[in-house]
Amino acid sequence: MSSSTTAPSLSASATVASQASPLVMRVIGACALAHLINDLIQAVLPAIYPLLKANYGLTFTQIGLITLTFQLTASLLQPWVGFHTDRHPKPWLLPAGMLCTLVGILMLAFVGSFAPILVASALVGIGSSTFHPETSRIARLASGGRYGLAQSTFQVGGNAGSAFGPLLAAAIVIPYGQGQVAWFGLFAAFAIVVGYGLSRWYRNHLNLFRLKQGGAATHGLSKRRVTFALVVLALLVFSKYFYMSGFTSYFTFYLIEKFDLSVASSQLYLFMFLGAVAAGTFFGGPIGDRIGRKAVIWFSILGVAPFTLALPYVDLFWTGVLSMIIGFILASAFSAIVVFAQELVPGNVGMIAGVFFGLMFGFGGIGAALLGHLADIHGIEYVYKLCSYLPLLGVLTILLPSTRTR
């Protein structure tokens, strides 16, 4: 890039950093709010699995296939959406994606068999695949250089939505039936309005976005070393979200089978776990800004192993305590992983966000399907014992390079 372009880029970046805090944080806050609603709607699906299983006589394998359908549509499209919009920004995709989610959630309220449930799940996944790369890019653009803070604030909105989804489902859907899922369409309609506002802000800042896209890598790593580091990060995401899928899809079944809890009581435990995930996500980004992404990843994935290994062998009280500790520690990694990857491949914010959100959904979906099949064969408690070893893959963090400027 020529010096005539670089100078405006630096000037524009400085302008963003020096903008009044309320303006920048209002945009980041709107991104987090939209993410909260998006993931709240998504969380309704696994939250009503016990209801769907009872209504339609589904097996654990079929439950896993529902999750797989949603996760694959959410994961396979995201990198392509991010790659394309990095080069050809399309602000209108934000409200359009939420419209797709609205159609999916309304279908889920009124379908009456397994196949239409899969279609509804796919539509919700497609809405998610357009949402995450676009909104992650907007949050980074509004960060003023505090990328970890922006990413974690954006991500904590999603985690909060994931936590409140099962709680609202337990209060609204479980007691009154599948048709009550339609009430969540109101959240989707509101998210369309928020997404439209964000798309207008983004459209007005497209020139700044294009200038900031032109930055060159400053870490001094070879292309081969960068590729290797991205593979390591992908393996860490695998260990994290394969394990997490056991919680989001089957924790209620685990509690019901092992401790004879009611569906409503099991949803409260799931809410506590997902609330701890939200808290861990919020702290992971800012801490990574201060002490480095690699240190956060070390602590988050490998550091949670003693607690996951103990979980299958404790009573109900300690299951609740350990699940919150696991959720808090394990969640702190994702923001650090995304920003670490974006620093490895500058100028591809949307593509990297799409790839890693896609991997998150993809590994989660494959994990849900495989773990559901294992639960049908060996029982749900066996699944939790097997998955407890996954965080040991966190030792791979030692292979990550430093991305500090040289």
Image (cartoon, rainbow, N blue to C red):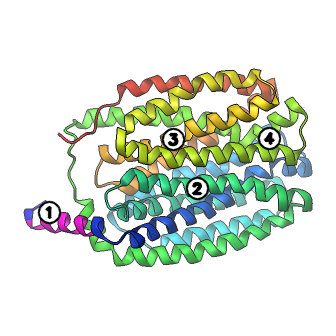
Q: Nearer the viewer, residue 282 or 358?
A: 282
Residue range highlighted in magenta: 4-15
x and y percentages locating residue 178 in the rendered image: 86, 61
Report which quarter residue 43 is drawn in. bottom right
- Across the whole image, how many numbered discs are drawn on residues? 4
- Amino acid type assigned to the residue bearing label 1 in the image: Thr
User: Hey, which quadrant is residue 324 in on the image?
Assistant: top right
Q: Which residue does the numbered mark 2 point to in the structure image? A: 158
- In the picture provided, is 87 more to the left or to the right than 71? left
Compare residues 131 and 117 and report the one nearer the observer: 131
Mark 4 vs mark 3: in front: 3
The residue under label 4 is 252
What is the CA distance from the residue labelled 2 to the residue labelled 1? 35 Å
Quadrant location of the N terminus in the rendered image: bottom left
Which of disc 4 and disc 2 is earlier in sequence? 2
Residue positioned 45% across, 69% down in the render: 27
User: Is any part of residue 90 visible from this angle?
Assistant: no
Q: Is tag 4's residue or tag 3's residue first in the polypeptide sequence? A: 4
**Which residue position is annotated with label 1?**
6
The reply to whether residue 163 is in sight is yes
- Residue 250 in percent (x, y) is at 75, 38
Q: Secondary structure at mark 3?
A: loop
Q: Name the one closer to the observer, 10 or 21.
A: 21
Q: Amino acid at mark 2?
A: Gly
Disc 4 marks a residue whose amino acid type is Thr
Label 3, residues with CA under 10 Å away: few <14, some 14-19, many ≥20: many
Q: Is residue 11 magenta?
A: yes
Residue shown at 50% from the left, 37% from the top: 237
Mark 3 is on which residue type? Ser
**Labels 2, 3: front one:** 3
Helix, strand, or loop for circle 4?
helix
Residue with the mark numbered 3: 332
